[in-house]
Image (tube, rainbow, N blue to C red):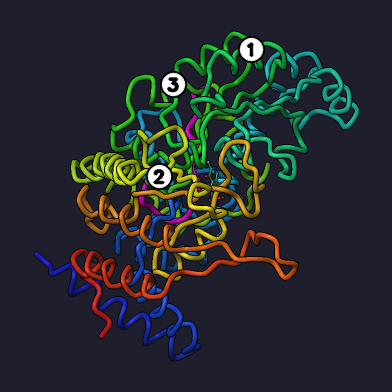
């Protein structure tokens, strides 16, 4: 059997030489990025490390090919190999998630959500509406028909989780296009428990009668009951859309099953492929059969030519995610989040919802006298990469915030287990309890400046260096 590590090292060493022959600074930045990623504790909940096979698949001549359209129905000649790639990626995705239909063209999570929104609207327009206007498909509707339709539908309402409760910008946040194209309302979490209150969601849905109910999150550290969400959607005649961008790896890895698996319950599911799913940077839509024809019109509705090289890498990543090793990985991601949370709780830190049962922990840093921004910066000084995040009803707003979001997907890929995550909690508490908020020029409390006690950064870097050395990133890649 081929020595995959040796082949990978040689592939990258040669690739960097080729790149350096044209623009050496890019080759240099690429090497530096690997060194930086190897040398830091990456706890960004939306990031991961894709396998060399996935990464290498992205660097090919599939990038050169235009293939607007769908498999077997392209607007360009010569797409037979792209057809192979797209069919295989979609087939793997359907099997992996047990979905009726998969669309693998979206370039990102946001694109996947746009495809979903427009296909839900297009689907609603089809059938009875087309009949009414004597049209065969949406393209036959005249401008006057559309105007009448828009007026008549009058129900472009979307109900999604609010940003500060853990929802995403695309779930109806005002400055995002989703908050402009829809009349939107948001549901939050229970102020006492921090958990989704399904009765409150139901009450809001009954009152608002949304066309689309969006479930899913970026920063909610708990599982969601999608069977209940579907009941609520059905009760008010809404389409249930689940954005599983963050936790699709846990769905693929069968950590979330039954009511916690969105695929059997939602009409349409969107995802990124690069977070817990550990694939290339991209998006994915899974849909029930009835929505498939409108999802297929993602291009030209909101997409241009698909990124064929990325669709190829999605196929490779989905093939990896079907393995028992990936299932063990996904379970370890969830177990590690528990260890991280317990490590914090044991040291008296405050967690939103009091813990986690997915891949992320939301640490409220106000008990350390810090804003999220100060905490994020101090941790970065010590080589711990996180992102600041709002907590529910955040007193510091969306820029400074009061929380830090931490995820376990990336370090679990490096091989970290429970003991290492317990130690990570200890190191984070060490940094934050040795960081002091600064003052503004006028002498008031600053939300941005801070100082870290002497010796802290060195102590924590040395300790995290030991953990990182024990679990090297891309051990098969030796560029020396
Ligand atoms: N949906 C959710 C829930 C997310 O958390 C994110 C990214 O953070 C996205 C969508 C957007 O993904 P992308 O950055 O690939 O557009």
Disc 2 from disc 1: Cα separation: 34 Å
Tell me where residue 268 appears, x and y as whole percent: 52, 28
The front one of 249 and 467 is 467
What residue sits right under mark 1 in the picture? Answer: 203
Q: Report crowding for label 2: few under 14, some 14 to 19, many 20 or more residues within 10 A (C-alpha).
A: some
Q: Secondary structure at mark 3?
A: loop
Residue 446 magenta-drawn? Answer: no
Q: Report crowding for label 3: few under 14, some 14 to 19, many 20 or more residues within 10 A (C-alpha).
A: some
Q: Counting residues from the N terminus, which is met first, the one under dot 2 or under dot 1? A: 1
* Mark 2 touches mark 1? (CB < 8 Å): no
- Place residue 372 in its image quadrant: bottom right
Where 184 falls versus 43 (above or below)?
Answer: above
Residue 470 is left or right of residue 363, and the answer is left
Query: What range is drawn magenta here?
Result: 277-289
Where 69 falls versus 392 (above or below)?
Answer: below
The front one of 127 and 458 is 458
What residue sits right under mark 3 in the picture? Answer: 225
Q: Is residue 84 visible?
A: no
- Whether disc 1's CB lies below 8 Å from ligand 1 is answered no
What residue sits right under mark 2 in the picture? Answer: 349
Q: Residue at x 86, y 30 (%)?
A: 142
Tell me where residue 172 appears, x and y as whole percent: 68, 35
The front one of 36 and 170 is 36
Residue 282 magenta-drawn? Answer: yes
Where 93 falls versus 41 (above or below)?
Answer: above
> Disc count in the image?
3
- Whether disc 2's CB lies below 8 Å from ligand 1 is answered no
The front one of 215 and 441 is 441
Disc 3 from disc 1: Cα separation: 16 Å
Closer mark to the observer between disc 3 and disc 1 = 1
């Amino acid at each position: 059997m081929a020595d995959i590590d040796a082949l990978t090292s040689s592939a990258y060493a040669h690739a960097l030489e080729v790149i350096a022959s044209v623009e050496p600074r890019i080759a240099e930045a690429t090497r530096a990025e690997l060194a930086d990623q190897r040398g830091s504790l990456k706890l960004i909940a939306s990031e991961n490390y894709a396998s060399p096979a996935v990464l290498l698949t992205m660097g090919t001549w599939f990038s050169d090919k235009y293939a607007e359209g769908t498999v077997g129905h392209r607007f360009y000649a010569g797409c037979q190999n792209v057809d192979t790639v797209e069919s295989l990626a979609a087939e793997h995705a359907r099997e992996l998630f047990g979905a009726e239909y998969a669309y693998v063209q979206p370039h990102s999570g946001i694109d996947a959500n746009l495809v979903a929104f427009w296909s839900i609207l297009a689907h609603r327009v089809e059938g009875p509406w087309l009949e009414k206007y004597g049209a065969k498909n949406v393209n036959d509707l005249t401008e006057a028909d559309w105007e009448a339709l828009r007026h008549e539908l009058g129900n472009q309402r979307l109900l999604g989780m609010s940003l500060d409760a853990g929802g995403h910008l695309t779930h109806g946040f005002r400055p995002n296009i989703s908050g402009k194209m829809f009349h939107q309302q948001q549901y939050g979490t229970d102020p006492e428990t921090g958990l989704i209150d399904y009765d409150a969601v139901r009450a809001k849905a009954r009152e608002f009668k949304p066309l689309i109910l969006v479930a899913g999150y970026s920063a909610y550290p708990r599982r969601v009951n999608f069977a209940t969400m579907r009941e609520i959607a059905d009760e008010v005649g809404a389409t249930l859309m689940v954005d599983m961008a963050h936790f699709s790896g846990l769905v693929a890895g069968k950590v979330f099953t039954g009511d916690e698996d969105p695929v059997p319950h939602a009409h349409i599911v969107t995802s990124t492929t690069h977070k817990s799913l550990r694939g290339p940077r991209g998006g994915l839509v899974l849909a029930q059969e009835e929505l498939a024809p409108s999802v297929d019109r993602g291009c030209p509705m909101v997409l241009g030519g698909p990124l064929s090289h990325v669709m190829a890498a999605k196929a490779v990543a989905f093939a990896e995610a079907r393995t028992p090793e990936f299932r063990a990985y996904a379970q370890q991601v969830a177990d590690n989040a528990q260890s991280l949370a317990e490590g914090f709780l044991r040291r008296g830190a405050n967690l939103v919802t009091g813990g986690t049962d997915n891949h992320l922990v939301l640490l409220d840093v106000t008990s350390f006298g810090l804003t999220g921004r100060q905490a994020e910066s101090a941790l970065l000084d010590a080589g711990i990469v996180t992102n600041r995040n709002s907590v529910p009803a955040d007193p510091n707003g969306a820029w400074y915030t009061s929380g830090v979001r931490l995820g376990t997907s990336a370090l679990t890929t490096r091989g970290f287990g429970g003991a290492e995550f317990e130690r990570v909690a200890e190191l984070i508490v060490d940094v934050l309890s040795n960081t002091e908020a600064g003052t503004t020029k006028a002498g008031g409390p600053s939300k941005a400046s801070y100082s870290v006690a002497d010796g802290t950064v060195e102590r924590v870097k040395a300790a995290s260096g030991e953990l990182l050395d024990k679990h090297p990133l891309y051990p098969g890649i030796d560029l020396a």
